[in-house]
Image (cartoon, helix red, strand yellow):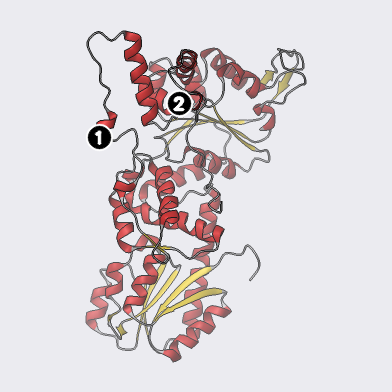
Amino acid sequence: MKAGAVTCDALLVDDNDGFARVVAEVARQCGCKLVRAETLDQARELTAKQGFDLILVDIELPDGNGLDLLDDLEVDAHGRIAIVTGAPSVESVLRILKSPVVDYLVKPVTAAALQQLFTEANDYARHRTTLAESAGGMIGRSPQIRALLGEIAQVGPTDVSVLVHGESGTGKELVARALHHASGRSGAFVAVNCGALAQDLLGSLLFGHERGSFTGAVQSHTGYFEQAQGGTLFLDEITEMPQALQVYLLRVIETRTFTRVGGTREIPVDVRLIAATNREPRACMEEGLLRQDLYYRLSGYRLHTPPLREHREDIPLLARHFLDSLNRRYGTAKHFAPEALVRMGEAAWPGNVRELRHAVQRSYLIAREGNQLDFQPESMPHTATDSDQSGLVKFTVGMSFEDIEREMLLKTLARCGNNKSRAARILGITSKTIYNRLVRYRALGLIDDATLHGSIDDPSEEEPDLSR
Protein backbone atom coordinates (compact mmCIF):
# COMPACT_ATOMS: atom_id res chain seq x y z
CA MET A 1 0.00 0.00 0.00
CA LYS A 2 1.32 3.48 -0.82
CA ALA A 3 2.64 5.66 1.98
CA GLY A 4 -0.01 8.01 3.23
CA ALA A 5 -2.82 5.86 1.79
CA VAL A 6 -6.01 5.57 3.81
CA THR A 7 -6.27 2.23 5.60
CA CYS A 8 -9.64 0.51 5.91
CA ASP A 9 -9.88 -1.32 9.26
CA ALA A 10 -12.19 -4.34 9.28
CA LEU A 11 -13.12 -6.85 11.99
CA LEU A 12 -14.29 -10.43 11.41
CA VAL A 13 -16.02 -12.08 14.37
CA ASP A 14 -16.16 -15.77 13.40
CA ASP A 15 -14.67 -19.04 14.70
CA ASN A 16 -14.77 -20.81 11.32
CA ASP A 17 -11.17 -21.05 10.04
CA GLY A 18 -12.16 -21.83 6.44
CA PHE A 19 -14.47 -18.83 6.13
CA ALA A 20 -11.88 -16.64 7.88
CA ARG A 21 -9.26 -17.54 5.24
CA VAL A 22 -11.63 -16.56 2.42
CA VAL A 23 -12.50 -13.24 4.06
CA ALA A 24 -8.81 -12.51 4.76
CA GLU A 25 -7.91 -13.07 1.10
CA VAL A 26 -10.69 -10.78 -0.15
CA ALA A 27 -9.67 -8.13 2.40
CA ARG A 28 -6.06 -8.35 1.21
CA GLN A 29 -7.11 -7.94 -2.42
CA CYS A 30 -9.20 -4.89 -1.51
CA GLY A 31 -6.36 -3.33 0.49
CA CYS A 32 -8.13 -3.62 3.85
CA LYS A 33 -6.54 -4.44 7.18
CA LEU A 34 -8.46 -7.35 8.74
CA VAL A 35 -8.50 -8.28 12.41
CA ARG A 36 -10.16 -11.50 13.56
CA ALA A 37 -11.95 -12.33 16.81
CA GLU A 38 -12.97 -15.96 17.37
CA THR A 39 -15.13 -15.30 20.43
CA LEU A 40 -17.65 -12.75 21.65
CA ASP A 41 -15.34 -11.64 24.45
CA GLN A 42 -12.48 -11.03 22.03
CA ALA A 43 -14.79 -8.98 19.81
CA ARG A 44 -15.95 -6.87 22.77
CA GLU A 45 -12.35 -6.19 23.75
CA LEU A 46 -11.32 -5.18 20.23
CA THR A 47 -14.31 -2.91 19.58
CA ALA A 48 -13.72 -1.18 22.91
CA LYS A 49 -10.13 -0.39 21.86
CA GLN A 50 -10.72 1.05 18.39
CA GLY A 51 -13.26 1.87 15.70
CA PHE A 52 -13.68 -0.25 12.56
CA ASP A 53 -14.88 0.74 9.11
CA LEU A 54 -16.51 -2.69 8.66
CA ILE A 55 -17.55 -5.36 11.17
CA LEU A 56 -18.63 -8.83 10.03
CA VAL A 57 -20.32 -10.80 12.83
CA ASP A 58 -21.29 -14.47 12.92
CA ILE A 59 -24.29 -15.32 15.11
CA GLU A 60 -23.14 -18.68 16.52
CA LEU A 61 -19.97 -18.13 18.54
CA PRO A 62 -18.33 -20.44 21.11
CA ASP A 63 -19.19 -18.16 24.06
CA GLY A 64 -22.52 -16.68 23.00
CA ASN A 65 -24.72 -15.07 20.38
CA GLY A 66 -22.96 -12.68 18.03
CA LEU A 67 -26.04 -10.45 18.04
CA ASP A 68 -25.26 -9.63 21.68
CA LEU A 69 -22.23 -7.70 20.41
CA LEU A 70 -24.58 -5.20 18.79
CA ASP A 71 -25.88 -4.19 22.20
CA ASP A 72 -22.35 -3.32 23.35
CA LEU A 73 -21.17 -1.42 20.28
CA GLU A 74 -20.87 2.34 20.31
CA VAL A 75 -22.32 2.62 16.83
CA ASP A 76 -20.96 6.12 16.18
CA ALA A 77 -17.43 4.78 16.66
CA HIS A 78 -17.76 2.30 13.78
CA GLY A 79 -18.75 2.17 10.14
CA ARG A 80 -20.74 -0.58 8.45
CA ILE A 81 -21.95 -3.63 10.40
CA ALA A 82 -23.04 -6.88 8.75
CA ILE A 83 -24.37 -10.17 10.12
CA VAL A 84 -23.00 -13.31 8.44
CA THR A 85 -24.64 -16.59 9.47
CA GLY A 86 -24.95 -20.17 8.36
CA ALA A 87 -28.15 -20.64 10.36
CA PRO A 88 -30.65 -17.90 9.46
CA SER A 89 -33.81 -17.63 11.55
CA VAL A 90 -36.87 -15.45 11.87
CA GLU A 91 -35.79 -14.57 15.41
CA SER A 92 -32.41 -13.24 14.27
CA VAL A 93 -33.98 -11.26 11.43
CA LEU A 94 -36.49 -9.63 13.79
CA ARG A 95 -33.74 -8.78 16.23
CA ILE A 96 -31.51 -7.04 13.73
CA LEU A 97 -34.42 -4.91 12.55
CA LYS A 98 -34.00 -3.04 15.86
CA SER A 99 -30.25 -2.68 15.41
CA PRO A 100 -27.91 -0.63 13.17
CA VAL A 101 -27.08 -3.67 10.98
CA VAL A 102 -27.03 -2.81 7.28
CA ASP A 103 -26.52 -6.31 5.81
CA TYR A 104 -27.70 -9.82 6.63
CA LEU A 105 -25.69 -12.39 4.66
CA VAL A 106 -26.25 -16.14 4.62
CA LYS A 107 -23.32 -18.55 4.22
CA PRO A 108 -21.89 -19.56 1.88
CA VAL A 109 -21.15 -15.94 0.95
CA THR A 110 -19.85 -15.28 -2.56
CA ALA A 111 -16.54 -13.55 -3.13
CA ALA A 112 -18.39 -10.85 -5.09
CA ALA A 113 -20.58 -10.03 -2.09
CA LEU A 114 -17.54 -9.79 0.19
CA GLN A 115 -15.70 -7.62 -2.34
CA GLN A 116 -18.69 -5.28 -2.42
CA LEU A 117 -18.61 -4.94 1.37
CA PHE A 118 -14.88 -4.22 1.50
CA THR A 119 -15.06 -1.79 -1.43
CA GLU A 120 -17.77 0.20 0.31
CA ALA A 121 -15.78 0.05 3.57
CA ASN A 122 -12.81 1.51 1.70
CA ASP A 123 -15.03 4.32 0.45
CA TYR A 124 -16.22 4.95 4.01
CA ALA A 125 -12.65 5.08 5.31
CA ARG A 126 -11.66 7.59 2.62
CA HIS A 127 -14.73 9.70 3.34
CA ARG A 128 -14.00 9.62 7.07
CA THR A 129 -10.39 10.73 6.53
CA THR A 130 -11.26 13.38 3.95
CA LEU A 131 -13.94 14.80 6.22
CA ALA A 132 -11.52 15.09 9.12
CA GLU A 133 -8.83 16.69 6.93
CA SER A 134 -11.19 19.14 5.24
CA ALA A 135 -12.55 20.13 8.64
CA GLY A 136 -9.12 21.01 9.96
CA GLY A 137 -9.03 17.86 12.06
CA MET A 138 -12.52 18.27 13.54
CA ILE A 139 -13.88 14.94 14.76
CA GLY A 140 -17.51 14.13 15.48
CA ARG A 141 -20.60 12.36 14.22
CA SER A 142 -23.20 14.00 16.44
CA PRO A 143 -26.00 16.06 14.87
CA GLN A 144 -24.41 19.24 16.26
CA ILE A 145 -21.02 18.59 14.65
CA ARG A 146 -22.57 17.37 11.41
CA ALA A 147 -24.61 20.58 11.23
CA LEU A 148 -21.48 22.66 11.90
CA LEU A 149 -19.54 20.83 9.18
CA GLY A 150 -22.44 21.40 6.81
CA GLU A 151 -22.35 25.15 7.46
CA ILE A 152 -18.57 25.17 6.96
CA ALA A 153 -18.96 23.40 3.62
CA GLN A 154 -21.60 25.92 2.56
CA VAL A 155 -19.92 29.17 3.58
CA GLY A 156 -16.28 28.03 3.16
CA PRO A 157 -15.97 28.54 -0.62
CA THR A 158 -17.16 32.17 -0.36
CA ASP A 159 -15.11 35.19 0.73
CA VAL A 160 -17.67 36.28 3.35
CA SER A 161 -16.23 37.32 6.73
CA VAL A 162 -17.15 34.87 9.49
CA LEU A 163 -17.55 35.44 13.22
CA VAL A 164 -17.08 32.27 15.29
CA HIS A 165 -18.24 32.19 18.90
CA GLY A 166 -18.20 29.48 21.52
CA GLU A 167 -16.72 28.53 24.87
CA SER A 168 -12.97 28.09 25.36
CA GLY A 169 -11.77 24.72 24.13
CA THR A 170 -14.58 24.11 21.63
CA GLY A 171 -12.35 24.33 18.56
CA LYS A 172 -12.87 27.82 17.16
CA GLU A 173 -9.45 27.81 15.46
CA LEU A 174 -10.20 24.40 13.96
CA VAL A 175 -13.37 25.89 12.47
CA ALA A 176 -11.34 28.76 11.04
CA ARG A 177 -8.82 26.35 9.51
CA ALA A 178 -11.66 24.29 8.05
CA LEU A 179 -13.16 27.42 6.46
CA HIS A 180 -9.77 28.27 4.98
CA HIS A 181 -9.38 24.75 3.61
CA ALA A 182 -12.85 24.86 2.07
CA SER A 183 -12.20 28.28 0.53
CA GLY A 184 -9.55 26.97 -1.84
CA ARG A 185 -7.56 30.18 -1.33
CA SER A 186 -3.92 29.84 -2.35
CA GLY A 187 -2.49 32.05 0.41
CA ALA A 188 -1.53 31.08 3.94
CA PHE A 189 -3.70 30.65 7.00
CA VAL A 190 -2.44 33.04 9.69
CA ALA A 191 -3.81 32.88 13.24
CA VAL A 192 -3.48 35.75 15.71
CA ASN A 193 -4.64 35.76 19.32
CA CYS A 194 -5.44 39.40 20.04
CA GLY A 195 -5.51 38.76 23.79
CA ALA A 196 -2.08 37.14 23.91
CA LEU A 197 -0.13 40.02 22.36
CA ALA A 198 0.99 43.28 23.90
CA GLN A 199 -1.74 45.69 22.84
CA ASP A 200 0.63 48.57 22.15
CA LEU A 201 2.43 46.35 19.61
CA LEU A 202 -0.65 44.74 18.07
CA GLY A 203 -0.98 47.40 15.34
CA SER A 204 2.61 46.87 14.24
CA LEU A 205 2.21 43.10 14.32
CA LEU A 206 -1.01 43.20 12.28
CA PHE A 207 -0.09 45.80 9.68
CA GLY A 208 3.69 45.82 9.82
CA HIS A 209 5.99 48.83 10.25
CA GLU A 210 8.65 50.73 8.37
CA ARG A 211 12.24 51.06 9.49
CA GLY A 212 12.68 53.85 12.04
CA SER A 213 8.94 54.23 12.66
CA PHE A 214 9.53 53.86 16.42
CA THR A 215 12.34 53.13 18.85
CA GLY A 216 13.69 49.65 18.15
CA ALA A 217 12.32 49.45 14.60
CA VAL A 218 15.74 48.82 13.04
CA GLN A 219 14.25 47.29 9.91
CA SER A 220 10.94 47.03 8.08
CA HIS A 221 8.52 44.37 9.27
CA THR A 222 5.86 42.47 7.32
CA GLY A 223 2.65 42.25 9.35
CA TYR A 224 0.11 39.46 9.61
CA PHE A 225 -2.10 40.99 6.91
CA GLU A 226 0.69 40.80 4.35
CA GLN A 227 1.65 37.31 5.52
CA ALA A 228 -1.95 36.19 4.87
CA GLN A 229 -2.14 37.80 1.42
CA GLY A 230 -4.37 35.66 -0.78
CA GLY A 231 -5.30 33.52 2.20
CA THR A 232 -7.10 33.79 5.54
CA LEU A 233 -6.41 35.87 8.65
CA PHE A 234 -7.91 34.49 11.85
CA LEU A 235 -8.33 37.04 14.65
CA ASP A 236 -9.01 35.12 17.86
CA GLU A 237 -10.34 36.93 20.93
CA ILE A 238 -11.29 39.91 18.77
CA THR A 239 -12.88 41.68 21.76
CA GLU A 240 -9.38 42.08 23.27
CA MET A 241 -8.41 44.41 20.41
CA PRO A 242 -8.17 48.10 21.50
CA GLN A 243 -10.95 50.37 20.25
CA ALA A 244 -8.56 52.57 18.26
CA LEU A 245 -7.24 49.55 16.41
CA GLN A 246 -10.80 48.32 15.77
CA VAL A 247 -11.45 51.59 13.94
CA TYR A 248 -8.41 51.05 11.73
CA LEU A 249 -9.36 47.40 11.12
CA LEU A 250 -12.79 48.57 9.97
CA ARG A 251 -11.18 50.90 7.45
CA VAL A 252 -8.99 48.07 6.13
CA ILE A 253 -12.06 45.88 5.64
CA GLU A 254 -13.91 48.64 3.79
CA THR A 255 -11.06 49.85 1.55
CA ARG A 256 -9.11 46.59 1.22
CA THR A 257 -5.93 48.59 1.70
CA PHE A 258 -3.73 49.42 4.68
CA THR A 259 -0.65 51.43 5.57
CA ARG A 260 2.25 50.14 7.62
CA VAL A 261 3.02 51.88 10.89
CA GLY A 262 5.30 54.80 10.01
CA GLY A 263 4.63 54.37 6.30
CA THR A 264 2.77 56.42 3.69
CA ARG A 265 2.17 53.90 0.90
CA GLU A 266 -1.24 52.22 0.77
CA ILE A 267 -0.88 48.47 0.27
CA PRO A 268 -3.76 46.55 -1.39
CA VAL A 269 -4.75 43.39 0.46
CA ASP A 270 -6.76 40.31 -0.50
CA VAL A 271 -7.41 38.56 2.80
CA ARG A 272 -10.45 36.75 4.09
CA LEU A 273 -11.16 37.64 7.72
CA ILE A 274 -12.40 35.19 10.33
CA ALA A 275 -12.82 36.47 13.89
CA ALA A 276 -13.65 34.60 17.08
CA THR A 277 -14.72 35.28 20.65
CA ASN A 278 -15.62 33.04 23.57
CA ARG A 279 -18.45 35.38 24.54
CA GLU A 280 -21.81 36.14 22.93
CA PRO A 281 -20.92 38.65 20.17
CA ARG A 282 -23.98 40.87 20.60
CA ALA A 283 -23.36 41.10 24.34
CA CYS A 284 -19.77 42.18 23.61
CA MET A 285 -21.08 44.85 21.26
CA GLU A 286 -23.55 46.13 23.86
CA GLU A 287 -20.81 46.22 26.52
CA GLY A 288 -18.54 48.26 24.25
CA LEU A 289 -15.92 45.54 23.84
CA LEU A 290 -16.65 45.27 20.12
CA ARG A 291 -17.58 48.26 17.97
CA GLN A 292 -21.03 48.00 16.45
CA ASP A 293 -19.87 48.84 12.94
CA LEU A 294 -17.02 46.33 13.16
CA TYR A 295 -19.39 43.67 14.51
CA TYR A 296 -21.62 43.96 11.45
CA ARG A 297 -18.61 43.90 9.12
CA LEU A 298 -17.16 40.77 10.72
CA SER A 299 -20.41 38.86 11.11
CA GLY A 300 -21.16 38.33 7.45
CA TYR A 301 -21.90 34.84 8.72
CA ARG A 302 -21.92 33.61 12.32
CA LEU A 303 -20.91 30.14 13.43
CA HIS A 304 -21.38 28.67 16.90
CA THR A 305 -19.08 25.93 18.23
CA PRO A 306 -21.14 23.79 20.64
CA PRO A 307 -19.76 22.88 24.08
CA LEU A 308 -18.81 19.25 24.58
CA ARG A 309 -21.65 18.68 27.06
CA GLU A 310 -24.11 19.24 24.20
CA HIS A 311 -22.67 16.44 22.04
CA ARG A 312 -21.48 13.84 24.54
CA GLU A 313 -21.89 11.05 21.99
CA ASP A 314 -18.67 12.32 20.36
CA ILE A 315 -16.59 11.88 23.54
CA PRO A 316 -15.53 8.22 22.90
CA LEU A 317 -14.70 9.05 19.28
CA LEU A 318 -12.62 12.08 20.28
CA ALA A 319 -10.87 10.22 23.08
CA ARG A 320 -9.91 7.35 20.77
CA HIS A 321 -8.71 9.84 18.16
CA PHE A 322 -6.40 11.54 20.68
CA LEU A 323 -5.14 8.19 21.96
CA ASP A 324 -4.54 6.90 18.42
CA SER A 325 -2.42 10.01 17.74
CA LEU A 326 -0.32 9.33 20.84
CA ASN A 327 0.08 5.65 19.96
CA ARG A 328 1.24 6.51 16.43
CA ARG A 329 3.62 9.15 17.70
CA TYR A 330 5.31 6.98 20.33
CA GLY A 331 4.92 3.54 18.79
CA THR A 332 2.69 2.19 21.57
CA ALA A 333 -0.53 0.18 21.61
CA LYS A 334 -2.35 1.54 24.65
CA HIS A 335 -6.13 1.35 24.90
CA PHE A 336 -8.95 2.49 27.16
CA ALA A 337 -10.59 0.35 29.77
CA PRO A 338 -14.32 0.15 28.85
CA GLU A 339 -15.33 1.77 32.15
CA ALA A 340 -12.92 4.65 31.48
CA LEU A 341 -14.88 5.68 28.39
CA VAL A 342 -18.11 5.44 30.37
CA ARG A 343 -16.74 7.80 33.03
CA MET A 344 -15.48 10.17 30.32
CA GLY A 345 -18.97 10.32 28.87
CA GLU A 346 -20.37 11.32 32.26
CA ALA A 347 -17.74 13.97 33.18
CA ALA A 348 -18.56 17.70 33.12
CA TRP A 349 -15.71 18.87 30.81
CA PRO A 350 -15.90 22.62 31.53
CA GLY A 351 -12.77 22.96 29.39
CA ASN A 352 -14.51 21.16 26.51
CA VAL A 353 -12.50 19.29 23.85
CA ARG A 354 -9.20 20.87 24.93
CA GLU A 355 -9.71 19.55 28.46
CA LEU A 356 -10.64 16.11 27.10
CA ARG A 357 -7.47 16.04 25.04
CA HIS A 358 -5.35 16.91 28.06
CA ALA A 359 -7.16 14.25 30.11
CA VAL A 360 -6.30 11.60 27.51
CA GLN A 361 -2.68 12.71 27.53
CA ARG A 362 -2.59 12.52 31.32
CA SER A 363 -4.18 9.06 31.33
CA TYR A 364 -1.67 7.95 28.70
CA LEU A 365 1.25 9.11 30.84
CA ILE A 366 0.15 7.53 34.11
CA ALA A 367 -1.06 4.20 32.67
CA ARG A 368 0.83 1.49 34.57
CA GLU A 369 -0.98 -1.84 34.28
CA GLY A 370 -0.17 -3.18 30.84
CA ASN A 371 -1.38 -0.89 28.09
CA GLN A 372 -4.80 -0.11 29.59
CA LEU A 373 -5.80 3.49 30.31
CA ASP A 374 -8.15 4.41 33.11
CA PHE A 375 -9.89 7.72 33.81
CA GLN A 376 -11.01 9.14 37.14
CA PRO A 377 -12.66 12.61 37.02
CA GLU A 378 -11.55 13.38 40.57
CA SER A 379 -7.90 12.98 39.52
CA MET A 380 -8.15 15.84 37.03
CA PRO A 381 -6.60 19.21 37.97
CA HIS A 382 -9.20 21.64 39.31
CA THR A 383 -10.50 24.35 37.03
CA ALA A 384 -11.99 27.75 37.70
CA THR A 385 -15.43 26.17 37.78
CA ASP A 386 -14.71 24.00 40.81
CA SER A 387 -16.67 24.88 43.91
CA ASP A 388 -14.34 23.63 46.63
CA GLN A 389 -13.08 25.73 49.54
CA SER A 390 -9.92 26.82 47.66
CA GLY A 391 -12.21 28.90 45.46
CA LEU A 392 -13.20 31.17 48.35
CA VAL A 393 -11.73 34.61 49.00
CA LYS A 394 -11.89 35.80 52.61
CA PHE A 395 -12.24 39.51 53.35
CA THR A 396 -12.11 41.05 56.81
CA VAL A 397 -13.48 44.31 58.14
CA GLY A 398 -10.87 47.04 57.84
CA MET A 399 -9.26 45.78 54.61
CA SER A 400 -8.64 48.52 52.06
CA PHE A 401 -10.27 48.41 48.62
CA GLU A 402 -6.82 47.92 47.12
CA ASP A 403 -6.19 44.87 49.32
CA ILE A 404 -9.60 43.43 48.41
CA GLU A 405 -8.92 43.98 44.71
CA ARG A 406 -5.48 42.36 44.98
CA GLU A 407 -6.81 39.30 46.81
CA MET A 408 -9.60 38.83 44.29
CA LEU A 409 -7.29 39.22 41.30
CA LEU A 410 -4.55 36.89 42.59
CA LYS A 411 -7.03 34.24 43.73
CA THR A 412 -8.82 34.28 40.37
CA LEU A 413 -5.50 34.16 38.52
CA ALA A 414 -4.36 31.17 40.59
CA ARG A 415 -7.64 29.34 39.91
CA CYS A 416 -7.12 29.93 36.17
CA GLY A 417 -3.62 28.43 36.23
CA ASN A 418 -2.08 31.91 35.79
CA ASN A 419 -3.93 32.26 32.49
CA LYS A 420 -4.36 36.02 32.31
CA SER A 421 -6.81 36.04 29.40
CA ARG A 422 -9.16 33.64 31.16
CA ALA A 423 -8.90 35.49 34.48
CA ALA A 424 -9.63 38.77 32.71
CA ARG A 425 -12.80 37.35 31.20
CA ILE A 426 -13.99 36.08 34.58
CA LEU A 427 -13.31 39.43 36.26
CA GLY A 428 -14.74 41.48 33.40
CA ILE A 429 -11.54 43.43 32.74
CA THR A 430 -8.80 43.32 30.08
CA SER A 431 -5.60 41.28 30.11
CA LYS A 432 -3.64 44.54 30.01
CA THR A 433 -5.32 45.71 33.22
CA ILE A 434 -4.29 42.48 34.96
CA TYR A 435 -0.73 42.81 33.69
CA ASN A 436 -0.45 46.42 34.86
CA ARG A 437 -1.70 45.44 38.34
CA LEU A 438 0.81 42.59 38.52
CA VAL A 439 3.68 44.91 37.54
CA ARG A 440 2.77 47.13 40.50
CA TYR A 441 2.47 44.16 42.87
CA ARG A 442 5.89 42.89 41.75
CA ALA A 443 7.45 46.29 42.34
CA LEU A 444 6.02 46.20 45.87
CA GLY A 445 7.43 42.71 46.43
CA LEU A 446 3.95 41.15 46.78
CA ILE A 447 4.38 38.57 43.98
CA ASP A 448 7.28 36.83 42.26
CA ASP A 449 8.44 36.91 38.65
CA ALA A 450 6.72 33.60 37.85
CA THR A 451 3.31 35.08 38.58
CA LEU A 452 4.08 38.22 36.59
CA HIS A 453 5.52 36.51 33.53
CA GLY A 454 3.39 33.34 33.52
CA SER A 455 1.22 32.21 30.60
CA ILE A 456 -0.95 34.86 28.98
CA ASP A 457 -2.91 32.66 26.60
CA ASP A 458 -4.75 29.34 26.82
CA PRO A 459 -2.61 26.16 26.72
CA SER A 460 -1.26 25.26 23.29
CA GLU A 461 -3.28 22.95 21.08
CA GLU A 462 -0.07 21.15 20.17
CA GLU A 463 0.63 17.79 21.76
CA PRO A 464 3.40 17.87 24.38
CA ASP A 465 6.63 16.01 23.70
CA LEU A 466 6.00 12.97 25.89
CA SER A 467 9.29 11.35 24.93
CA ARG A 468 11.27 13.62 27.26
Residue 256 visible in the shown view: no
Disc 2 marks which amino acid? Lys
Q: Earlier in the sequence, mark 1 or mark 2?
A: 1
In the displayed structure, does residue 153 sit left or right of residue 208?
left
Asked if residue 128 is positioned above or below residue 58 in the image, the reply reads above
Quick one: 401 or 101, which is closer to the camera? 401
Looking at the image, is 153 positioned above or below residue 325? above
Residue 14 is left or right of residue 452, and the answer is left
Q: Residue placed at 77% from the left, 18% from the top? A: 218
Camera-side residue: 316 or 68? 316
How many neighbours does mark 2 have within 10 angstroms: few (below 14), some (14-19), or many (20 or more)? many
Q: Position of residue 109 (x, y in %)?
A: 43, 86
Instruction: Give the answer, above or below, for where 150 lies relative to 209.
Output: below
- Quadrant (top left/top right/bottom left/bottom right) for the N terminus: bottom right
User: 196 or 153, which is in the foreground?
Assistant: 196
Residue 391 lies, in percent from the top left, at 28, 29
| Kind of residue at badge 1 | Asp
Element marked by disc 1: loop
Rendering quarter of residue 423: top left
Say what secondary structure mark 2 lies in.
helix
Look at the image and tell me whether residue 188 can be seen: yes
**What residue sits right under mark 1 in the picture?**
388
Q: Position of residue 126 (x, y in %)?
A: 54, 62
Question: Is residue 422 positioned above or below 75 on the image?
Answer: above
How many discs appear? 2
What residue is rendered at 39% in x and 35% in y? 167
Residue, disc 2: 420
Residue in the picture at 57% in, 74% down: 31
- Classed neighbour count for the residue bearing mark 1: other residues with Cα under 10 Å, few (<14), some (14–19), many (≥20): few
Q: Residue at x 27, y 78 (%)?
A: 93
Q: Horizontal and vertical percent for residue 44? A: 34, 72
